[in-house]
Amino acid sequence: MLLYPRVIAHRCGGAFAPENTLAGLRVAAELGVTGVEFDVMLTRDGSAVLIHDETLERTTNGHGRVAEHDLAALQRLDAGITHAPQYSGERIPTFEQAWQSCADLGLWANIEIKPSEGQDVATATVLGNCLRDCWRADAGVVSSFSETALLAFAERAPDIPRALLVTEIPGDWQARLAGTGCVALHCKGDQGDLPVRLDKALAAGVPVACYTINNRVVGERLLAAGVAALFSDRLDIW
């Protein structure tokens, strides 16, 4: 059975640090959160890095598509200044740096495969190769919206637990879990028919985690209904 922490910091440090950075991981740990989520994408030269958008403008001082830059160029960018001046100089981390930081800080990790367009298999393959020899028991879960990526990851690291990431729990969720070998569902917490499909998933022994919950009352209601974990930006309310 896949075990989740109650609250998972969205994109490393929620609203309290630059997203998808090592600073975010440190902030999450300082705030007492034991689980983090982050996004993994490939550079032009095939390195796995932490970033959410396919383009650089929102979270860094760079320009253009992530997939059009080599790792060395990306790591010269400032990934902290757009969040707050005190984070100026924060870099885009490699997956390996983030994974080691999670180990050092004692953080459980939800690793989301976030491929740039057309890079589903390549991103999942690189991540699977990275993780299959260094996975730690009960260290977390790998998730993705891309079923193609989940299947490619399973070919490289079949024993690492995977979660299917969806907006709303689909009517054919059982078939899609079976088809991808996933053991959990991650979905929006505000979907209208969540209680009905949540009950069915829980009855089948499938953990469900909900994103992105920034209201404690809503979060407590979901946890009471049986949701396994909440992804949140508001790490101060829990």
Image (spheres, grey):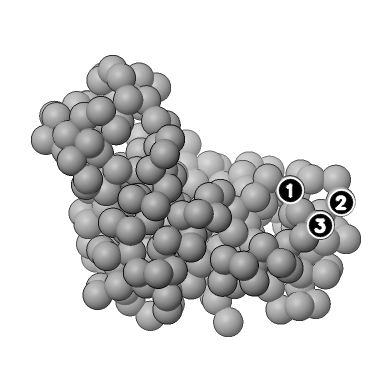
Asked which quadrant contains residue 163, the reply is bottom right
Residue bearing the label numbered 1: 168
Q: Label 3 amino acid?
A: Gly
Residue bearing the label numbered 2: 193
Q: Position of residue 98 (x, y in %)?
A: 27, 54
Q: Is residue 96 in view?
A: yes
Asked which quadrant contains residue 56, the reply is top left
Task: State the CA–CA distance, disc 3 to disc 2.
Answer: 11 Å
Residue 89 lies left or right of residue 63; in this view the side is left
Q: Residues within 10 Å of mark 3 (few under 14, many from 20)?
A: few
Instruction: Determine whether 158 is above or below 28 in the image.
Output: below
Q: Label 2 amino acid?
A: Asp
Which residue is painted at 62% across and 56% down in the image?
186
Which residue is painted at 82% across and 61% down in the image?
197
Q: Position of residue 107 (x, y in %)?
A: 37, 64
- Mark 3 element type: loop
Residue bearing the label numbered 3: 171
Q: Label 1 amino acid?
A: Glu
Q: Residues within 10 Å of mark 2 (few under 14, many from 20)?
A: few
- Reading the chain from its start, which is encountered first: label 2 or label 1? 1
Say if mark 2 contacts mark 1, CB within 8 Å: yes
Residue 140 lies left or right of residue 50; in this view the side is right
Which residue is painted at 30% across and 31% down in the image?
66
Task: State the CA–CA distance, disc 1 to disc 3.
Answer: 9 Å
Q: Position of residue 2 (x, y in %)?
A: 55, 76
Residue 67 lies left or right of residue 234; in this view the side is left
Task: State the CA–CA distance, disc 2 to disc 1.
Answer: 9 Å
Which residue is painted at 29% across and 33% down in the image?
67
- Reading the chain from its start, which is encountered first: label 3 or label 2? 3
Instruction: Determine whether 204 is above or below 218 in the image.
Output: below
